[in-house]
Structures are given as C-alpha cells and as structure tokens.
Amino acid sequence: MLLKNKHILLGITGGIAAYKCAHLVRLLIKEGASVKVVMTKAAEEFVTPKTLSVLSKQEVVADFFDSNHNWNNHVTLAEWADLMIIAPLTANTLAKLATGVCDNIVTACYLSARAKVFVAPAMDLDMFQHPTTKRNLETLHLDGLRIIPAEHGELASGLMGEGRMAEPETIVEFIKKQLQADLPLLGKKVLINAGPTYEAIDPVRFIGNRSSGKMGVCIADAFARLGADVTLVLGPSNQMPSEKSVSIKRIESAEEMLAVCEPLFAECDIAILSAAVADYKPKTVSNSKIKKKESDFSIELIKTVDVLEQLGKHKKHQLLVGFALETDHLIDYAKEKISRKNLDFIIANSATEEGSGFGVDTNKITIIDKHNKLNQFELKSKQEVAEDIVSFTLNYLKFSHA
Ligand code: CTP
C-alpha cells in the first residue's frame, strides 16, 4: 500500500552491485510502484539499460542526450518522482552528492529532486571506512537523505567486512518502514472545517464575518502531510490548501456546513472544527433585492445551528476538537465549550491579542483538554501553529489509547 502508485526514480551508479537493481526494479513494480531508471555510463558496464527497460516497462535514461541528440530533461524526471533511490551509491557518486557536482544524469536528477531521496551505499571495505566516506555520508544525512545501511559480508574484492549494498528486499523494507514512520496518520480520516459562513439577507447581501479560513487550511495541509485522508469543508474563503491530496467541499451557510459535515463526521477518526460559523441568520431571506426606503430598516435574526454541538451529540469513536475565539475570559469561556459541545480538547485563541485571530498570518493558542489541563504555545506562524495542533493530536491519540 505504501508504494502503490508511487513514482520512483531509480538512479543506478557504477558498482558491481548495480546488477542487483534488476531485481530491485521487479520488487518495486510488485509493490505497485511505477519505476523510471536513470543510470550513469559506468553503471552500464554492470547491468544493461535494455534489461532495466524491459523490467520497468519504461525508457531508461543514461545520458543528458539520447541517440537522436534529444535532450533528456532531468528536471522533468525529478519532478515526476515521489521518491528517488540511488543504488548502488558508489564512493564517487557519494562525493558528488555531498558537494553538488552534477556531471551526469543521476546527479543532475538528484540536485533537481524535491522528493525524498534514499541511498544504498556500496563500496569496498577500506573505501567504506575511509574518513572521507564517513564525512560525506554524514553530509548526506544532514542534507536529509535516508541512508540504507550497507551490510557486512563478502565484498567483490574478496575482502570481508562492511560495504555490501543492502539486498533489494532489505532496501524495499527499509523504504516502506521509513514511509510508514513519516506518515503516522496514514489511513486516518480527518474532517476539518474552515472559513466564515455567509447567511443570506437577499440575493445580493449577506451577514458574514472577517475569518480568512487560513488557520483551518493550514491544519488541513499539516494533517495531509502526515498521510491522513483529509476533507476540508470550506466556507467563502480565497485560501486553498497546498497539499493536492486534500479533498475540498465548498459551502456557504451554517446549514450547508452541517449538512456536509454530518455524514463526513460519521465516517471520520478526527474532526477539527475551526470555521467561524455565524451564530445568527436573518429570519426570512428575500427572493428579490431589498430596495432602499426613506425609513430605517431592521432585520430579525434567528439562531443558526451549532455545527460543532450537533456533531458532539453524535460523537462515538471520533476525536472531536473545537476552536474558541474570544475577546475576553478566553480560558473560562473555552472550558465551558468543552463540556457543552462534548469535545476532547479545544483550541483557544484571542480575537484581540496582537498577532492572534482573524486576518493575520500568525496565531497564539492555548490548548485545553477535557481535564482542564492547559497547554500554552508561543506566537507563531499559522503553519507552525497547525504543526503544533497536529503533534498535540498525535500525542493525545497515543495517550488515550495507552
Ligand atoms: N461553532 C459551530 N457552529 C456555530 C458556532 C460555533 O460549529 N453556529 C463552532 C466553531 O467552529 C468553533 C466552536 O464552535 O469550533 C466555538 O465557536 P465560538 O464562536 O468561539 O463559540 P460559540 O459557541 O459560537 O459561542 P460564542 O460566540 O457565544 O462565544
């Protein structure tokens, strides 16, 4: 499941272990991944592009130009990749990656790749133990690359020791384990709502509020980045998530918000309701534009539905989280909402404190759990606040299932 439909760019460099890459391609394809191979000239001495092309069912790229002098665009190849594997990683390519030398298609793809990169070092014992190699591997580690440990065993030179490339099965298992650890919320369904609601007065006017929806959109992105299956129910807002996997449902009024959220809530594991849902709406909505008169004009307002409270009434296994935006008595009012709305915890933020609330790119939150324990956070960007909320949620889940 972890590698299914993933685009994997396999960079092969010139070491004897390159022959094992034929088997590696087969294993990756068996996992449901699409594999494209790029290789250095030296790698062609150990495994043929034809073998790899037949196994991967894709053209293999071995140079910046093909035999018809067409340019092989390394940037397009790198952008295609969800992850890149460089195996075997020779001492020579290791040094190039550590210093940014890019004189072949593999190193050029590496420098252009924004995807996660895994490397499987393979070299002879003395090369592997050389301080330069150790230093270069440390540089790669600091650069965020995932290093698949070399194994102990008989080496091509006949020496025994560390330096053998990990077996293809081990490489696949290592990658799957790492992806699993990077995506602790894989398979979890998360419902987020965000933005204001608009309550119609007539076809051209409405009652709304100043919420931008940014906080909720950042939370949706932060959950999606950890592998969750996120649905964002978004009111009138021009903010959009950057994570492509987030599914967006647009609504306008409080009533529509409830209608869309209710069935999603029944199916979800975690729901975070950050929307600034209107508390009141006009009692009647005029079908035609209301004309200006000489006299003053008043609108009778009635209560809207409280979306969060309604979901709280049907809560079963779900973790339910609300927001509290207040101008005063922030903590006391927030605590009262935890029990009234049947929440696991609430995220309190001030509408008046500098850098907090609507229309700014920062926020300062206090998370209060249902045992009234307060967790205060510093003023941060809304992206960072979203990361804090996700970490808190992960810990909360761990603790409540312990
Ligand atoms: N909320 C909701 N539906 C409403 C009003 C609020 O779902 N009609 C949710 C918000 O999304 C938020 C939480 O309830 O998660 C608290 O919203 P807030 O406006 O702070 O509180 P209210 O319950 O509306 O009470 P008050 O406005 O009096 O503070």
Image (tube, rainbow, N blue to C red):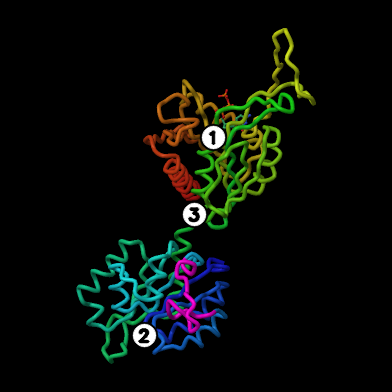
Q: Quadrant of residue 19?
A: bottom left
Q: Which of marks 1 and 3 is in front?
A: 1
Q: Which amino acid does label 2 sit on?
A: Ala
Q: Residues within 10 Å of mark 3 (few under 14, many from 20)?
A: some
Residue holding disc 2: 42
Asked whether 367 or 251 is in front, the reply is 251
Mark number displayed over residue 342: none
Q: How crowded is mark 1: few (under 14 residues within 10 Å), some or many (20 or more)?
A: many
Q: Residue at x 46, y 21 (%)?
A: 329
Residue 227 to residue 79: above or below: above
Query: Along the horizontal axis of the image, is 241 left or right of 128?
Result: right
> Which residue of the protein is positioned furthest toward the bottom in this rendering?
158
Q: Quadrant of residue 143?
A: bottom left
Q: Nearer the viewer, mark 2 or mark 3?
A: 2
Q: Residue at x 39, y 89 (%)?
A: 45
Q: In which quarter of the image is residue 352?
A: top left
Earlier-in-chain disc, 2 versus 3: 2
Give the Cα separation between the discs numbered 2 and 3. Answer: 38 Å
Residue 45 to residue 148: above or below: below
- In which quadrant of this rendering is ligand 1 seen? top right
In magenta, the rendered stretch is: 59-78
Q: Residues within 10 Å of mark 2 (few under 14, many from 20)?
A: some
Give the Cα separation between the discs numbered 2 and 1. Answer: 55 Å
